[in-house]
Image (cartoon, rainbow, N blue to C red):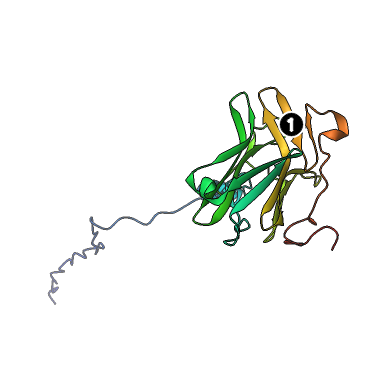
Amino acid sequence: MGRTKRNKKTKRIKRLRPSVNKSASPKKTYSFKSLSSILKRSWKVIVGLGVIVGLVVGIKTLFLNDKTAPISFEQPRFSEDVNELTVTLGGMNFTYNRSTLEKGPKEPLISAEFKPVKVYLDNGQLYADVTVLGGSGLPPLKIRKNVVYGKPNQWDINYNETALEIVTKQHKPVYQFIYKSPSKIVINGLFPLPSGLLVATEKSSILNPTGRTIFSLDPIFKYPSWKYKGQYKEE
């Protein structure tokens, strides 16, 4: 028998290769070291943001609670039935009529052209613009039209419808404005002058006092003012 030859067709099997999308970014793989580095950088960023936020909040709180900023208060109102007003300062009396005070400030205390006290009327409101002793090493404290400028942080202010007082952190008065009657006011305080310091009380005045005589004024209000608003000491 003859051999039957089979023509074996060799089939070529093409290996299918997955198509690659060149536009797609390859997946990134991270090692433990790279992850650790990323976490460290992220932590530094978080800490940095926290520090910035803390500084912003701290600065905002500081300015909101800064007691050296101007402080407004309501001063006793001049009685419309009174035509003359007597100002008692340093044991001396100064009398002014209503029309005179409405025309402009009057200075009951003058020292070498320095005028630490000015009294005047504006729309029926009596004002006393004064310059008094400030804190240690600080510029003088000023009151201008019922606004206090330069009050040290731990000092306090208390007042009611007939009196006003500013004290140090030890509750030692540096300024007092008191209505003794509808026609009489008393101004006490520690007034810096070119020649030194003047302590003015209702009955006397002392130039360049020493020791305890510097803070010889007795408080008229209780403190702290937030707790005893407008309450007199003897109450």
Residue 206 percent location from the top left of the image? 79, 31
Query: Residue 8: x and y, percent?
Result: 16, 69
Residue farthest to the bottom? 1
Considering the image in quadrants, where does the N terminus appear?
Answer: bottom left
Residue type, label 1: Leu
Q: Quadrant of the C terminus?
A: bottom right
Residue bearing the label numbered 1: 198
Q: Is residue 20 above or below residue 59?
A: below
Asked if residue 138 lies left or right of residue 6, the reply is: right
Q: Is residue 185 above or below residue 203?
A: below
- Residue 208, given in percent of the width and then of the height, sits at 78, 26
Asked whether, in this view, residue 216 is left or right of residue 165, the answer is: right
| Near-viewer residue (27 or 231) | 231
Q: Is residue 185 visible?
A: yes
Q: Residue at x 69, y 58 (%)?
A: 162
Label 1: few (<14), some or many (≥20) within 10 Å? many
Residue 128: x and y, percent? 60, 46
Q: Is residue 37 at all visible to an observer of this figure?
A: no
Q: Is residue 11 above or below residue 90?
A: below
Q: Secondary structure at mark 1?
A: strand
Left or right of 99? Residue 78 is right
Q: Residue at x 74, y 57 (%)?
A: 225
What residue is at 12 percent from the left and 74 percent from the top?
Answer: 2
- Count of marks, rendered view: 1
Instruction: Look at 63% across and 57% down and name the residue there.
Output: 76
Task: Tell me the quarter of the picture where residue 214 sits.
Answer: top right
Q: Nearer the viewer, residue 157 or 57?
A: 157
Closest to the observer: 7 or 186? Answer: 186
